[in-house]
């Protein structure tokens, strides 16, 4: 266990399994290891309140294809995400919105990703994402990308001994 947990902001992709949605490249083993990292204090997971826009959209768009019903199971997932204490929910501050606006003006049209990246920068967090398009855009535009990290790299970074 690390003495000071890594502060990690989650992309909405990492919340989808709570609703029973499988994410390509994110196995049940990965999810279990990420959970262990949070429980043992190696990592402190943060979520930006704006991700609900994407999460709700993805669930509603895919509900029929995936056989998801917006019912008690979804309600339990929402309550777990919001009230379990496992995630710290944050709201964007003015400098976060300003940076997100700059990203949009430079051509990146995904406002939620812009807010997430900006929140990770302004709050000095790692940004857990598998979004290679965002990383490519940021790099091309001269923005810092070293704090963008995927789950496998995060698990290696914290030296989770049970992770292989």
Image (cartoon, rainbow, N blue to C red):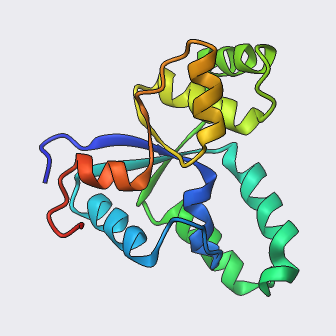
Residue 152 position in % (x across, y down) = 37, 56
Residue 61, by quadrant, is bottom right
Question: Which of the two residues, 76 or 17, is positioned nearer the viewer here?
Answer: 17
- Quarter of the image with the C terminus is bottom left
Left or right: 59 in relation to 117: right
Please tell me which residue is depicted at 70% across the width and 42% down the height of the picture.
Answer: 50
Above or below, 146 relative to 5: above
Left or right: 83 in relation to 56: left
Residue 97, by quadrant, is top right
Please tell me which residue is depicted at 55% across the width and 16% down the height of the picture.
Answer: 143
Residue 103 position in % (x across, y down) = 71, 19
Q: How many marks?
A: 0
Above or below, 128 relative to 133: below
Residue 54 position in % (x across, y down) = 75, 52
Above or below, 32 relative to 58: below
Residue 92 position in % (x across, y down) = 62, 29
Please tell me which residue is depicted at 61% across the width and 74% down the height of the picture.
Answer: 22
Please tell me which residue is depicted at 44% across the width and 48% down the height of the picture.
Answer: 150
Residue 108, by quadrant, is top right
Above or below, 50 relative to 140: below
- Quarter of the image with the N terminus is bottom left
């Amino acid at each position: 266990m690390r003495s000071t947990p890594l502060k990690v902001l989650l992309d909405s992709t990492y919340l989808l399994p709570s609703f029973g949605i499988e994410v390509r490249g994110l196995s049940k083993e990965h999810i279990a290891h990420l959970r262990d990292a949070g429980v043992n204090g190696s990592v402190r997971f943060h979520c930006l309140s704006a991700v609900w826009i994407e999460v709700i959209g993805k669930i509603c768009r895919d509900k029929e294809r995936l056989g998801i019903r917006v019912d008690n199971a979804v309600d339990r997932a929402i309550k777990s995400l919001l009230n379990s204490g496992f995630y710290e929910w944050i709201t964007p501050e003015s400098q976060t919105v300003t940076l997100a606006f700059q990203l949009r003006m430079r051509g990146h049209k995904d406002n939620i990703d812009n807010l997430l990246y900006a929140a990770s920068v302004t709050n000095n967090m790692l940004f857990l994402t598998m979004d290679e398009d965002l990383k490519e855009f940021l790099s091309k535009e001269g923005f810092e990308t070293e704090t963008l990290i995927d789950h496998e790299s995060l698990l290696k970074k914290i030296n989770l001994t049970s992770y292989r």
